[in-house]
Image (tube, helix red, strand yellow):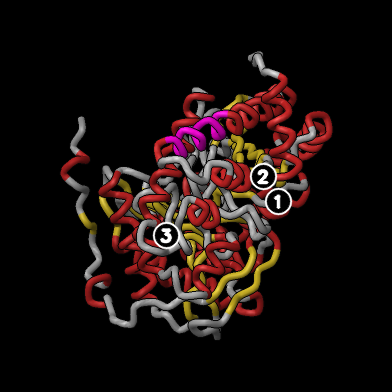
Amino acid sequence: MKYMIHPQEIMETLTMLRAQNLDIRTITMGISLRGCRGGSGSVLGQEIYDRITTRAAGLVAVGEDIEREYGIPIINKRISVTPIAVVADGLPREEMVEVGVWMDRAAREVGVNFIGGFSALVQKGFTVGDRALIEALPQTLAETERVCASVNVASTKAGINMDAVYLMGRMIKDTAELTRETDGIGCAKLVVFCNAPEDNPFMAGAFHGVGEPDTAINIGISGPGVVLNVVKQHPGVDLGTMANAIKNTAFKITRMGELVGREASRRLGVSFGIVDLSLAPTPEAGDSVAEILEAMGLERCGAHGTTAALALLNDAVKKGGSMASSYVGGLSGAFIPVSEDQGMIEAVEVGSLSLDKLEAMTCVCSVGLDMIAIPGDTSVETIAAIIADEAAIGMVNKKTTAVRIIPAPGKREGERVEFGGLLGRAPVMRVNPFSAELFVKRGGRIPAPIHALTN
C-alpha cells in the first residue's frame, strides 16, 4: 500500500516525534500455537518454544531497523500466543506452570519485552484446562519475568461467570503475596476481562485469538503528548471544534502506525493485522491522558465533568483513527492506568480522583480499572466484587472492560508502590469498607442482558 503524504504532514510528524513523545508503543507478533502438541508440560513447552523462536526470530531486529530508517521510536517488541488453556487443555496445574516457564525462555531468547497469552476464556464456564491454568497463575507470574496473563470472565453474549470472578479474586491475592518483595508486581502482569479482543497488541492482556491467522503483526500506537499539545493550541474553542482537532491528529498518528505495521509485516513475511490507536500514557511528564482532560478545562482529573471530557476524547480518537485505516482493532481509545500516568497519580494524591470515579470513567473509555494499587489487606471478596462491577459495565455496554489491580502486600491507603519503567508508581487507593461477600459467594452466572439477543 502506498501513501500520498504532503511535506507539511512530514514536518508535523517530526515535531510530534521530537517534542511531543509520539512513538509506536509496541509491535506485537501474534503466533498461533494450535499446531503444538504434547502430553506433558515439558514436551508441549519445547514445542511452543521452538515455534516462537522460529516465527519471531527476526522480530526485534526488524523493529530496530524500521526505527533507524524511519526515525520513529518503537518502544516495545512483544509476542502474543493462542490462549494456553486451549493449547494445553488437560495438563495439570504444575505442568501449566512448566509451559509458562518455556514461554518465558522463548521470549528471552528472541529478545522481546513481554509475551502474552497465558490466558483462559471462561465467560460461560470452565474446562479442566481452564481451571488448571487459572490455578497456575500465581506461581507462573512469580517465577517468570516476561509472561503476561489474562482471563476473560464475562461477555455481552454469555453474561458474567461469577465462579470465575471469585476465583480470580483469590488468584490476584495469591499472586500479590508471592511477589510481595516487589510490591505485588505479578499482579501488574495479570488482566481480568469482559469482552476481551482477540487482536490486542497491548500487555498484559494480549493473546492471539483462535480466529486469527497463523502469524500476524499488530501495532499499538500512542501519543497522549501529541493530543495534549493540540488541546493546548485551542484554548478558546468550543468542544465540537476541539473534538475535530483531536480527530485530525488521531488520523495522522494512525497513518504512521499503519505504515510501520505494514512495513514490519512485509519484512517478516507475515500478515498485517490491526492498528490499535489507544492513547497509552507513560510516567513521563507531558505524556498523560489526565493532563489532556485538565487542558480541556478541568481543574483536576476526577472533578465533575471528567467523564464527559473523557467521552469526547475517546470518541474523537476513534473517529480519526477509523478514517485513517480500515484495520483498526484491539482496544483503541484512551487508557487510564493510574500508575503509568503522572497526571492520574497526582489527581489521586490530592484527593480529586477516587476508585469510584475511575469506575465511572470506564463506562466511556477503552479499558477499565488499570494499574490501580489497593491496600494489601483487601479481601478476596472485595476484589471479586470490583471485578464483577467492571464486568457488568462491559457486558451491558457491549464494550471491552478490564481490571488490573494490585493489592499491595503490607501497604495501606496513602502509601505507595514502586514498579519502575513503564509500569511507574502508584498511590494505594481507598476501597469501600463494606462487604459484598454474600453476593459474590452466591456463584453461578449473571445472565446476559436482553440486548445480547441480536441474532
Question: Residue 344 at what x, y percent from top left?
Answer: 53, 63
The picture quadrant where one finds residue 315 is top left
Question: If the image is split into quadrants, where does the C terminus sit?
Answer: top left
Residue found at the very far left of the displayed protein: 450
Tell me if mark 1 has few (under 14), some (14-19) or many (20+) residues whose alpha carbon lies within 10 angstroms of its own.
some
Residue stretch in magenta: 241-251
Which residue position is annotated with label 3? 131
- Please tell me whether mark 1 sits on a helix, a strand or a loop: loop
For the residues labelled 3 and 1, the Cα–Cα distance comes to: 27 Å
Left or right, residue 48 beside residue 439:
right
Q: Is residue 92 visible?
A: no
Look at label 1 and name its amino acid.
Answer: Asn
Which residue position is annotated with label 2? 78
Question: If the image is split into quadrants, where does the N terminus sit?
Answer: top right
Look at label 3 and name its amino acid.
Answer: Arg
Question: Residue 169 at what x, y percent from top left?
Answer: 40, 69
Nearest the viewer among 410 and 349 is: 349
Nearest the viewer among 79 and 246 is: 246
CB of mark 2 within 8 Å of CB of mark 1? yes
Depth check, mark 3 against mark 1: the one in front is 1
Look at label 2 and name its amino acid.
Answer: Arg
Nearest the viewer among 163 and 185 is: 185
Left or right, residue 396 beside residue 305:
left
For the residues labelled 2 and 1, the Cα–Cα distance comes to: 6 Å
Nearest to N terminus: mark 2 or mark 1: 2
